[in-house]
Image (spheres, rainbow, N blue to C red):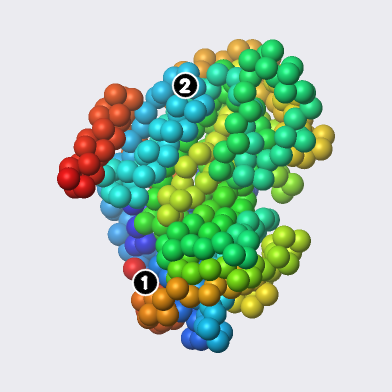
Amino acid sequence: MKELSELNLPDDVRYAESHEWAKPEGDKVKVGITDYAQDQLGDIVFVELPEAGDSFEKGEEFGTVESVKAVSELYMPVGGEIVAANTSLEDSPERVNNRPYSDGWMIEVKLDDASEMDGLLTNDAYLEKLKG
Amino acid sequence: MISSNNNRVSNSNSKSIAQVQAETRNAQLVTRNPKPGTRDSQPETRNSELDKCFCVDLGLIDYRTAWKLQTDLVEARINKTITSDIVLLLEHPCVFTLGRRGASENLFVSKSDLGKSGISVIQVERGGNITYHGPGQLVVYFIMDLEAARVAVVDFVEALEEVMLQTVGMWGITAERNPANRGIWVGDKKMGSIGIALRRGISFHGLALNVNLDLKPFSWIQPCGMQDVRMTSMKQELSEELSMNSVREVLKEQLEAVFGVALFTKSYFELEGILRNQKHESMAERV
């Protein structure tokens, strides 16, 4: 288990309190789970993701991850339409543990409302939240 | 809640617990400490401020009824109508359940044979693959706000295993963890299983310990979706029937010790009353 000071919390993504990150890329946003989340979950053995074309609101469940006999729900940090899902996680779910912000990305979303990004936390604010 | 500055794991555990803890990794439920150095600063409060946890003995209860109760309790925990964690202890009538990834190819009997046996197959949201529940198996569902308690999922699962290891240890059974699969094992045979789900940081489902369970229906499935997994029970290892009541009471004590909580018994009716009030309140809000 990592100490909070050991967490990788990059400053080019925004964070949701439910421990997902969102990174703007053009008019789309990539989404995954934070280093804190993957560390808490332990070895991830399965990732269940939606298909392109599905739409979800902010806060809605979009998928699940399974680790150590525990299935955890994943929630949309922003609302929108799924334009892509990281299908490589079907065969290599450990990417979420190893590289949560790069190879371990989960979905790409076309934003419904760009201002929803403003409601997310910066890395500093997220870290403060974790400190409680 | 298990707070950051107070190592709530009881330090009054019996010697046997300490021994086992020394032998196993993460035996105690130790939470992430966001303020290093403060964890042990107030040891005198360790046992005086244990978190209260509701505990309900449901007896033999239909799987779907207990499932609905769990999801209602998770909802009540999310919207804070109930602010305590909740432990449900029960047995299920015979049923096969498939976890999120469970597939019926791990079931070796046909649907029609199952129909004749009267055993149903239910797909649920918990982790793990296929398993069997029946009378004589002690099932514990733990609705705990892991997010608020700052308990990592991996530590929660290990703590549930620890509760089972300690419980069977009281009857002289040496069980252990197995890197191949979660749960507790006696040699290459599985005695207790784990399967949990997390919704908004709150756990549900839990553990199933084979006490006097008839193991035959396990031969109709590929337990956990793994080949050649053999199951055992406390009865099989000891060659005698155990009192479910005794095992349940010992398990409660171990749960209090490992999780550092104090269990407060509630009846099913009290719990239903709380849930009913919650529904009335939310309806009133809408009006």
> Mark 1: which amino acid?
Lys
**Against B107, is B7 above or below?**
below
The answer to whether residue A92 shows anywhere in this view is yes
Please indicate whether residue B45 sits to the left or right of residue B261 in the image: left
Q: How far apart are the two marked residues, 1 and 2, measured between alpha carbons?
A: 40 Å
Dot 2 crowding, Cα within 10 Å, few <14, some 14–19, many 20+: some
**Closer to the observer: label 1 or label 2?**
2
* Position of residue B254 measured from the top left corner of the image (x, y, whole percent): 46, 35
Q: Quadrant of the C terminus of chain B?
A: top left
Is B25 or A100 nearer to us in this picture? A100
Q: Residue at x 45, y 29 (%)?
A: B66
Disc number for residue B64: none
- The residue tagged with tag 2: helix, strand or loop? loop
Total of numbered circles in the picture?
A: 2
> Mark 2: which amino acid?
Ile
Q: Residue at x 53, y 22 (%)?
A: B92
Q: Residue at x 32, y 43 (%)?
A: B76
Circle 2 residue: B61
Q: Residue at x 37, y 28 (%)?
A: B56
* Position of residue B275 measured from the top left corner of the image (x, y, whole percent): 29, 35
The answer to whether residue B13 shows anywhere in this view is no
Q: Quadrant of residue B260?
A: top left
Disc number for residue A129: 1
Is B268 or B234 nearer to us in this picture? B268
Is A101 or B21 nearer to us in this picture? A101
**Against B33, is B200 above or below?**
above
Name the outermost residue toward the right. B228
Chain of the residue where label 2 is placed in the rendered structure: B
- The residue tagged with tag 1: helix, strand or loop? helix
Please indicate whether residue A87 sits to the left or right of residue A126 in the image: right
